[in-house]
Image (spheres, helix red, strand yellow):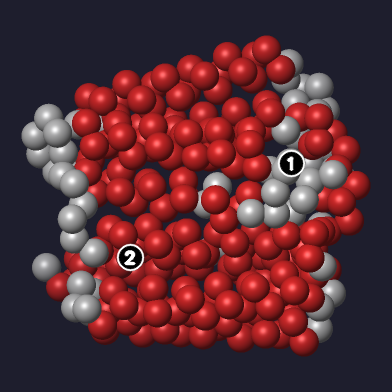
Amino acid sequence: MAGAAITAGCAGCNALTNFNDRDIDAVMLRTRHRPLPSGRITPQAALRFALGLIVVSLVLSALLNLFSLLWMALGILDNVGVYSLLLKRRSPLNILLGGFSGGLPVLFGWSAVTRGPIGGLPLGIVPFLMGGLVFVWIPVHIWFLAVSYRSDYSRAGVPMLPVVVGSATALRLIILFSLIMVPFSFALYLLGYFGPIYGAVALLAGLANLAGSLWVLYKPTETNAWRMFKISSPYLFLLFATMIIDAALRH
């Protein structure tokens, strides 16, 4: 049930943001062939589908426990309300303030596996470190995309950070967040929550991402930024998959 709830919630948020962004998606070369701007799906059908998924996610979350419902609702509110509706077209901080929703599925999962009608409040540091890791990864990943499609965002009037401050400054901030990612990921090993398998993968993956970020700063082309966007995509999957493997081997 938890897997169905988080899948429906993420899909519903994605559908709602695509509904809201259909006008700028039609202007941008990267997104103009999406179903809504290309006319393959009507806005009314997309909105009904999106709202249906959101309702399903909230109902399933409520059936799990109250804290699962809380994290799901906050994630939807931040992703759709804060990021898509309020900030995306107004502020270069859109990714940062809208990135909290990226870490909330971790808290949702933490509560979903606890028993009882209320669920577990994650008082420990583990879910917050895991959620924080997602939060600091999001600007690294998305700002690489924004650097590679800077002219596209500019044409659509979307104030992504590289559009507002320039690619060079944005790449320096990417390096800063890449540096922050390393202790966030490695702390889970240093504090004893995961073993040496995870620790080695976290350290090597973090250093590889940092080296790639420095390489793009040294050779700041749109092609290189796009390459790092693609390379950074499996970073979280690799770390979370290693957490599962590490925990399974230790127990």
Residue beneath the point at 65% across and 42% down: 87
- Is residue 35 at least partly visible in the picture? no
Which residue in the protein does label 2 denote? 129
Give the residue at mark 1: 89
Q: Quadrant of the C terminus?
A: bottom left
Residue sitting nearer the eye, 176 or 233? 176
Q: Which residue is drawn at 60% across and 28% down?
A: 16
Q: Nearer the viewer, mark 2 or mark 1?
A: 1
For residue 202, the mark is: none
Q: In this view, does 77 lie to the left or right of 43?
A: left
Q: Is residue 126 left or right of residue 31?
A: left
Q: Which amino acid does label 2 sit on?
A: Leu
Is 148 placed above or below 74 here? below
Q: Position of residue 119 (x, y in %)?
A: 16, 38
Q: Is residue 39 left or right of residue 234?
A: right
* Residue 191 percent across, percent down from the top left: 22, 78
Secondary structure state at the residue bearing disc 2: helix
Q: How far apart are marks 2 and 1 (CA)?
A: 30 Å
Say few, some or many: other residues with alpha carbon within 10 Å of mark 2 (under 14 / 14 to 19 / 20 or more): some
